[in-house]
Image: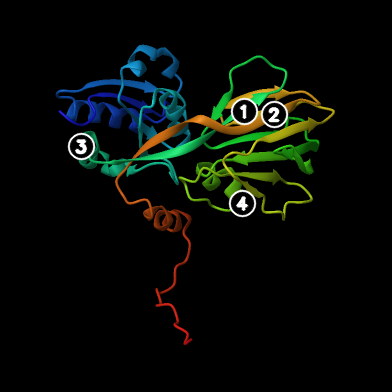
């Protein structure tokens, strides 16, 4: 039978209504399907369930989706986001509609949308690459003091930013942190990525959009430790002189989508409250 039959629900651990909705969905759509439930903090205990799953449903905000994506992407499991947050750019269903609409997705009707991710490594350290769907940030630590971040793109020095740090963002992340910094919104399925300084004397610089094959090197120049943050919940300390190397990851996140891809721009306008005037036909000019 087509569709999804081994389903995990990752819900926000501090939202009682998220847990209640998760239990309701498992009860209503449980026949003929295997379900398991976890919070974003207990996912590490669910390896066996994850390895046999064919769909992850997240209930919460974009932060909950990011936690789900981090365990789903490496296993090529699609993610369906149910939004209980304020904006929810990555979600496809609002929580109030989930009970009525989720069956359509479980039957395998949705299209799959791929979102490209970043891979970050720290030169000189033997560790697994850090994979990020939204962004990788090199920023000052807890001490309020500016840092300098030397930014090199494909072996060419772009700039040395003096301020709070630098963000390297995917197209998905362009509706997150970098949007608040004045960066552009990119088409969500674009493989390109964005470099944007944080609170520098060059803040008016809109950033640089790089092609998918590019590599970015961020070198910290600071008397105090700096921080590498990925997707808002992975944090590592960086010492003066350390370099973070960022490029496109080999894997990607998969999302279930109901609407055509072009509807992203209408959703963006609605969620950001952008004013839209009356639609006018383009003026035609004579030859």
**Residue drawn at the location 36% of the way across and 18% of the way down:** 50
Q: Nearer the viewer, mark 4 or mark 2?
A: 2
Q: Are marks 4 and 2 in contact (CB under 8 Å)?
A: no
Give the Cα separation between the discs numbered 1 and 2. Answer: 7 Å
Quadrant of residue 91 in the image?
A: top left
Give the Cα separation between the discs numbered 3 and 4. Answer: 37 Å
Q: Are marks 1 and 4 in contact (CB under 8 Å)?
A: no
Q: Is residue 267 above or below residue 100?
A: below
Q: Nearer the viewer, mark 1 or mark 4?
A: 1
User: In terms of secondary structure, where does tag 1 sit?
Assistant: strand
Give the Cα separation between the discs numbered 1 and 4. Answer: 21 Å
**Residue drawn at the location 24% of the way across and 29% of the way down:** 4
Q: Residue under circle 4? A: 183
Question: Where is residue 223 shown, x and y percent of the image?
Answer: 85, 28
Q: Are marks 1 and 2 in contact (CB under 8 Å)?
A: yes
Q: Earlier in the sequence, mark 1 or mark 2?
A: 1
Question: Where is residue 35 shown, x and y percent of the image?
Answer: 26, 21
Q: Earlier in the sequence, mark 4 or mark 2?
A: 4
Whether residue 42 is visible, yes or no, is no
Give the Cα separation between the discs numbered 3 and 1. Answer: 37 Å
Q: Are marks 3 and 2 in contact (CB under 8 Å)?
A: no
User: In terms of secondary structure, where does tag 4 sit?
Assistant: loop
Label 4 packing within 10 angstroms: few (<14), some (14-19), many (20+): many
User: In terms of secondary structure, where does tag 2 sit?
Assistant: strand
Q: Which mark is residue 18?
A: none
Q: Earlier in the sequence, mark 3 or mark 1?
A: 3
Give the Cα separation between the discs numbered 4 and 2. Answer: 21 Å
Label 2 packing within 10 angstroms: few (<14), some (14-19), many (20+): many
Q: Residue under circle 1? A: 120
Q: Residue under circle 3? A: 103
């Amino acid at each position: 039978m087509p569709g999804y039959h081994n389903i995990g629900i990752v819900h926000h651990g501090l939202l009682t209504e998220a847990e209640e909705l998760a239990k309701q969905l498992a009860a209503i759509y449980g026949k003929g399907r295997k379900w398991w439930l976890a919070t974003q903090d207990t996912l590490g205990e669910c390896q066996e369930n994850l390895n046999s799953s064919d769909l992850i449903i997240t209930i919460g905000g974009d932060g909950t989706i990011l936690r789900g994506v981090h365990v789903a992407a490496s296993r090529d499991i699609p993610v369906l986001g149910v939004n209980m947050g304020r904006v929810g750019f990555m979600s496809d269903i609002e929580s109030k509609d989930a009970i009525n609409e989720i069956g359509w997705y479980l039957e395998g009707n949705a299209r799959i949308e791929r979102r490209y991710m970043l891979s970050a490594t720290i030169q000189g350290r033997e560790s697994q690459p850090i994979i990020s769907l939204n962004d990788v940030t090199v920023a000052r630590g807890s001490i309020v003091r500016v840092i300098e971040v030397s930014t090199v793109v494909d072996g060419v020095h772009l700039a040395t930013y003096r301020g709070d740090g630098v963000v390297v963002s995917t197209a998905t992340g362009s509706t997150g942190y970098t949007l608040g910094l004045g960066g552009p919104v990119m088409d969500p399925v674009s493989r390109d990525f964005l470099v944007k300084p944080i609170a520098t004397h060059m803040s008016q610089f809109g950033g640089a959009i790089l092609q998918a094959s590019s590599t970015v090197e961020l070198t910290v120049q600071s008397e105090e430790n700096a921080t590498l943050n990925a997707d808002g919940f992975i944090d590592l300390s960086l010492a003066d002189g350390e370099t973070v190397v960022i490029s496109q990851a080999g894997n990607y996140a998969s999302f279930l989508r109901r609407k055509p891809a072009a509807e992203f721009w209408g959703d963006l306008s609605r969620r950001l409250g952008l004013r839209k005037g009356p639609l006018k036909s383009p003026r035609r000019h004579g030859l």
